[in-house]
Amino acid sequence: MKAFTTENIRNMAVIGHGDAGKTQLVSSLLYVAGAPRWGKVDEGTTVTDYEEDSIARKVSLNNNFAHLEYKDTKVNFIDTPGYAAFVSHARPALRVADCALVVVDGVHGIEVQTEKTWQYANEFMLPRFMVVNKIDKEHADFGHALETATSSFARSIVPFTLPLGAEGDFKGVVDVVHQKAYEFDANGKAKEIPMPESGRDVFDRTRERLIEIVAESDDALMEKYFESGTLDEEDIYPNLAKAIASSKLCPVYAVSATTLVGLQILLDHIVEFAPNPATHEAEYGFADNDMAGDRITRKYSADEPFSAYVFRTIADPFAGRINVMKVVSGKVSSDATVQNTSRDTAERVGALHVISGKTLDKVPEASTGDIIAVVKLKDTQTGDTLSEKAHPIVYPPVEYPEAAIAFAIEPKSRADEDKISVALHKILEEDPSLHFDRDAQTKEFILSGSGQLHIETVVKKLADRYHVEVALHPPKVPYKETITASAEVQGRHKKQSGGRGQFGDCKVIFEPLERGAGFEWVDKIFGGSVPQNFRPAIEKGIIEAAANGSVAGYPLVDFRVTLIDGSYHSVDSDEHSFRAAGRKAFRAAMEKARPTLLEPIMDVEVFTPQEVSGDIMGDLNSRRGRVAGMEMRGKQQVIKAKVPLSEMLDYQSKLNSVTQARGSYHMQFSHYDPLPGNLSQKVVDEAVAAGRVRPHEDDE
């Protein structure tokens, strides 16, 4: 494929709710632009959904890529997922796109994930095109879809095409900009027809609204509009692209991705009006990975030093690691050596490729603003910056939403256990919204993601691609234990069975401490009742015993032990004997100090539509939560509460149900509180059943 200049590149992130037809739209646009084959979602033949799991589920699981050449312009499409479990992948796509292509279902109008991805686009201040798809379907209503968009989004949304016919009779569109009408053949080719007289009033109102918005985008045009009540054609057309690029205008198109009606006009307008990378303001970064100090800027210009931002990593079973990046400034050629400024390492680029689905085509160089793929870079990951070593810059990486659901993941066999770490590492390279770590207390491997479907696709990928079988179950709650009363006890270890014996004796006081205080050791022996070199062994024995608790096998915390007396034998005493004495003192204390269970309490923030905030608070209360306050952020209500972790393990599904998936939440650890008695017994019973509570081994 030939190289394209910055002015002839369009980068479009295709966003919207699941099942709106994004993947089919991209495939159909490729076909209308001249692709030899028309890929279809129902047949599993689209360019951007090529993985087996995507084809089987008919769901996009991550960002995928396609490009076309049309009227000497290269259009790069980033096809993003629309289902709630995967929608966060739209963020890095919007980070590098120059325009969002918002796909709306013509039957349902604006839906939940359309709102969410629109908000993502707002964060990146991205211009937008809107496509109302499926106009050929039963009950499709272009006017209703337009109405829901206008009421949902505070932006000037104006149709650039109006549908001719509806449902099964949708055969053509009226181009409001060029004031022409078209019908389309079976291959999506447009044929101009006379402007229809029916619906002329709708066309006139739409045209008038378009002129108003163009006038509002420029002070001089506004003055001219007030004087004459309209604008000349030479004032309208050149200023449309400017109004779109400045986000003062969002054009809307009526199309059907399955019958190809309206797509050629959409392509024409993408080339004519969609912003190219050079219309962006300069990107900012920092001199090094500390992200501190003064900001550095890079313009989208070939005259600037080379820099690129890596926004997607693909673990291909044949090609290896594929890094997909946007060239922000300068240009890069094959076999160049560049600096990974995020990791301070040199990288040899090797061959450059343009990527379409799973196909890589070599190109000799890439210009400012283009999206390219590079294989087998040794250190580069998603979120990294590449630049010239002499002109370093680090672009801030995209932030992903916090994981909403966590599962303990357990290999089914020893062979699976050996392979799981490497396999998951490769999957995490592809999907930074996943998190994988090991809970230090429960010793479980925890896999966290944005929803149950998200985790299920990872499990399937582990099995299909890496031949690793795993089981999922809810993670254990890291309970702890503490004491609620003081106790003075003696720990005495004596063993005599011929030859040298064992003897250790200590007298200690156990006292409860405030939450979060941990463990405190105090030595108050005066004199030599226990020699100095044996006293640390008593402390060590108590710490060892406390690690396994006494109620349900959880660590005992927040207590002080004061050593006040003891005795020793000049021959039989040693460190082992006094460690055993410490363990016995711990067991004796637990019979008197009234041990109890502690549960982790989380600081929770729930983001929800205001109309269901009452239901959310009621549900949090039913989860033993304590609501601390509410505030408005934008259009959403934020509810702050403290809730036990054990009550939040299934919260995501409940929140989705109450808010129709429009709500989100995040939580972080706050503190430990005593677990109510009725729930403590249940935890103890589970610990006994799991074998975590056993009779103490005899230290004799």
Image (spheres, rainbow, N blue to C red):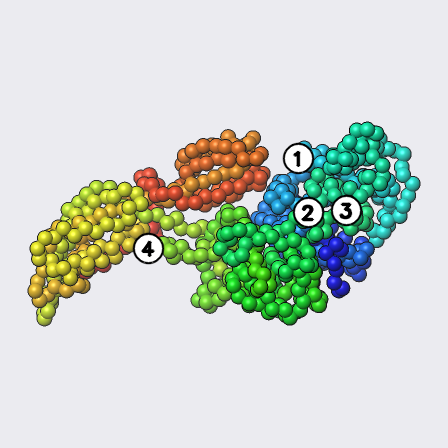
- Residue on which the image places disc 1: 154
Assign a secondary structure to mark 1.
loop
Residue 487 position in % (x across, y down): 17, 45
Q: CA distance from mark 4 to mark 1?
A: 59 Å
N-term mark: 4 or 2: 2
Q: CA distance from mark 3 to mark 1?
A: 21 Å
- Residue on which the image places disc 4: 691
Residue 620 position in % (x across, y down): 45, 36
- Callout 4–callout 2 Cβ contact below 8 Å: no
Question: Mark 3 packing: few (<14 Cα in 10 Å), some, or many (20+)?
Answer: many
Residue at screen point 66% across, 64% down: 332
Residue at screen point 57% across, 35% down: 634
N-term mark: 4 or 1: 1
- Callout 3–callout 4 Cβ contact below 8 Å: no
Kind of residue at badge 1? Ala
- Residue on which the image places disc 2: 100
- Residue on which the image places disc 3: 273
Q: Quadrant of the C terminus?
A: bottom left
Kind of residue at badge 2? Ala
Q: CA distance from mark 4 to mark 2?
A: 55 Å
Question: Vertically, is 27 above or below 681?
Answer: below
Q: CA distance from mark 1 to mark 2?
A: 16 Å
Assign a secondary structure to mark 3.
helix
Residue 62 position in % (x across, y down): 61, 54
User: 315 or 686, which lies in front?
Assistant: 315
Question: Vertically, is 477 above or below 151?
Answer: below
